[in-house]
Image (tube, rainbow, N blue to C red):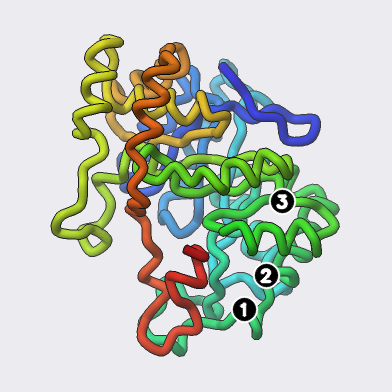
Amino acid sequence: MDTLSLGSDEMPIVGLGTWKSAPGEVYDAVRTALDAGYRHVDCAPIYGNEPEVGRALDETFAGGDVSRDDVWVTSKLWNDAHAPEDVQPALESTLEDLQLETIDLYLMHWPVALKPDTSMPQSPDDLVSLDEQPLAETWAAMEELVDDGLARHIGVSNFNIPKLQSLLEAGRIAPEMNQIELHPYLPQTEMVSFARENDVPLTAYSPLGSKDRPEGMKADDEPILLEDPTIVEIAERHDATPAQVLIRWAIERGTAVIPKSVNAGRIKENLAAADLSLTDDDMDALSGLGRGRRYVRGELWTLEGSPYTLESIWEE
């Protein structure tokens, strides 16, 4: 499988996403994925399933066919733990849930701060402005995780170019990943170019259009990526699935990609996308589908009276 270089380490370019994987299902999904050949699992405490992921990892490693050193595990710092003194305890909790001694990659989940012990904001009072809790202070605490051996690599998620640039300038350790929404409807060409020029790898989340995300996050008239005629036509021509075309598109652009599934057949199909070949004409056709469509817009952080706006989060 192709990999992305993070320092002296290699991260498998295709991983199993676990957002929206329900408890009771994610254990089997992780076991199936590892048995099928996945060596990269993407997690986060806010997904509510890290203990079950940890049980699947632990039992797989105990079986002896797959070792801990073979599997790349990513997790994320939730928004309520941005205060420097809360960063290490948050990772320690994640490591306990995942039954690991160290995390391969630890990401700041959003450039948004919440008050401690707040999963989701119910009022603007639950949100903390970046003037009160600067990203650079949170990042400095994450750098200490590397110093202490708790995290091998650190990065960010949902960062726009100016915010990523600010950490590149202020940090002692440069961000080694930006995990963002990427698919043909949202190709983020400027970010891809900026990241390449500054040696910051990218991971594509919601690469299939996140059709199964919560109903409250959906628009009435939103386009369904997997049903796009161009994508369907390319898939049929290659005897592939639309999902495989989208995953291969991400790989061809040099980005990691973390499709989520709890269906054993689709988990295996998604991994097989690594062996699909797309032509230059295919890539050109897919590149022409951009429409600035975000499926994960971030309205959770923009309650009336919030210090955050969609414009300030995305700089669009």
Question: In the figure, residue 203 lies in which quadrant?
Answer: top right
Residue 188 in percent (x, y) is at 48, 46
Q: Can residue 103 be spotted in the picture?
A: no
- 28 sits to left or right of 253: left
Q: Is residue 306 above or below residue 43?
A: below
Q: Which residue is labeled 2 in the image?
A: 135
Q: Residue at x 40, y 46 (%)?
A: 186
The Cα–Cα distance between marks 1 and 2, rounded to whole angstroms, is 7 Å
Q: Nearer the viewer, residue 28 or 4?
A: 4
Instruction: Tell me whether circle 3 and circle 1 mark residues in contact (CB < 8 Å).
Output: no
Q: Residue at x 23, y 64 (%)?
A: 216
Instruction: Tell me whether circle 1 and circle 2 mark residues in contact (CB < 8 Å).
Output: yes
Q: Residue at x 33, y 37 (%)?
A: 289
Mark 3 or mark 1: whose residue is earlier in sequence = 1
The circle drawn on residue 235 is none
Q: Which residue is labeled 3 in the image?
A: 175
Which quadrant of the rendered structure holds the N terminus? top right
